Amino acid sequence: MARQNGILKVTGKLDDLSFYKSKEGYLVRTKGGVPKERIQNDPAFVRTRENGAEFGQSAYAGKLLRVAVRNMLLNAGDGRVTSRLTQVMSKVKNYDLTSARGDRKVAIGLADDAAKALLKGFNFNNRALLGTVLFAPYTLDTATGEIDMASLNTANDISSATGATHVSLQAGFLDLDFETGISDIQYSPKVNLPVENVATSATLTPVAAPVGTGNKFYLLMIEFFQEINGVQYSLKNGAYNVLAIVGVDSI
């Protein structure tokens, strides 16, 4: 892989060269590698097929989670959340100690608390991490999904994005069955507060517990707004909004 440095940037194919655009800029690479048919059938590539199958399963598990929290993710995500979540799911899959190699699953791996701990604390927006934005203590009720901040000073306890005049907080309570793909998510009403040096509290209670017998995920979202003439506008299109998993099942 090489970078295109000329004035004219090209995309497409020419002989054995592929020109394309990525997040790193305009790149070029040569065509090559083992034919697909050989990888699919040659016994020498059995490990490759096993790794590919498990990677695909991990990517699918990540997609299930992203789709389940889509309404929140629309306001707080980064361009690499798909790949980052797939990496975590690949580690979760390794805790499946019963399935044969090539068939290990996230759904089985999540029976282990150590696997759940890998997802707890996951930030969907790596430009705004919960641990670097929120400094107020909070409690989580795993039965109801309620997140309570008994003492909150929005000026001191939240590292607001520059220009923010208001901050909004919301909790999400998700049930996701990675085996069937069925999910249900319930949200708390949003609590909108001015960014000011005043002590207050915030209680985020989902309207109900989600239906299902899958894994339970507890989410916290923090959004920043700028008020102009009485109207609040999402600050920088949500670039510095926070969305994080603060609990998985009972841990």
Image (spheres, rainbow, N blue to C red):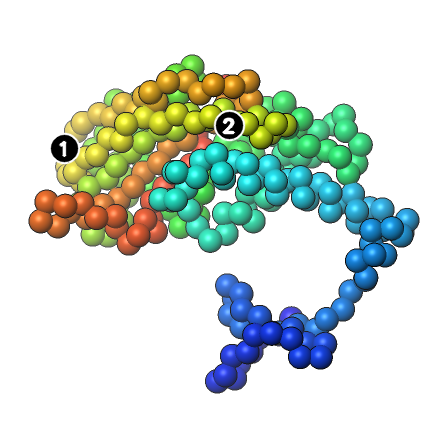
Q: Is disc 1 placed on a helix, strand or loop?
A: loop
How far from the left and from the top, in percent, is residue 52? 73, 47
Q: Is residue 49 left or right of residue 171?
A: right
On the image, the x and y values in percent for residue 189 come to 28, 27
Residue found 68% across the figure and 76% down from its top: 17
What residue did someone put label 1 on?
A: 198
Q: Which residue is rendered at x = 55% and y = 18% of the image?
A: 213
Query: What amino acid is at disc 2?
Result: Ser
Question: Is residue 129 toward the left or the right of residue 95 in the image?
Answer: left
**Residue 129 showing in the rendered view:** no
Q: State the SS at label 2.
A: strand
Q: Position of residue 137 (x, y in %)?
A: 32, 27
User: Which residue in the protein does label 2 denote?
Assistant: 183
The reply to whether discs 2 and 1 touch (Cβ–Cβ < 8 Å) is: no
Image-quadrant location for residue 39: bottom right
Q: Residue 193 in the image: x percent, y percent?
A: 19, 35
The quadrant of the rendering that contains the N terminus is bottom right
Is residue 50 shown left or right of residue 120? Answer: right
Q: Nearer the viewer, residue 176 or 90?
A: 176
Q: Amino acid at mark 1?
A: Val
Tell me how far mark 2 sits from mark 1, CA to CA: 39 Å
Answer with mark 2 or mark 1, whichever residue precedes in sequence: 2
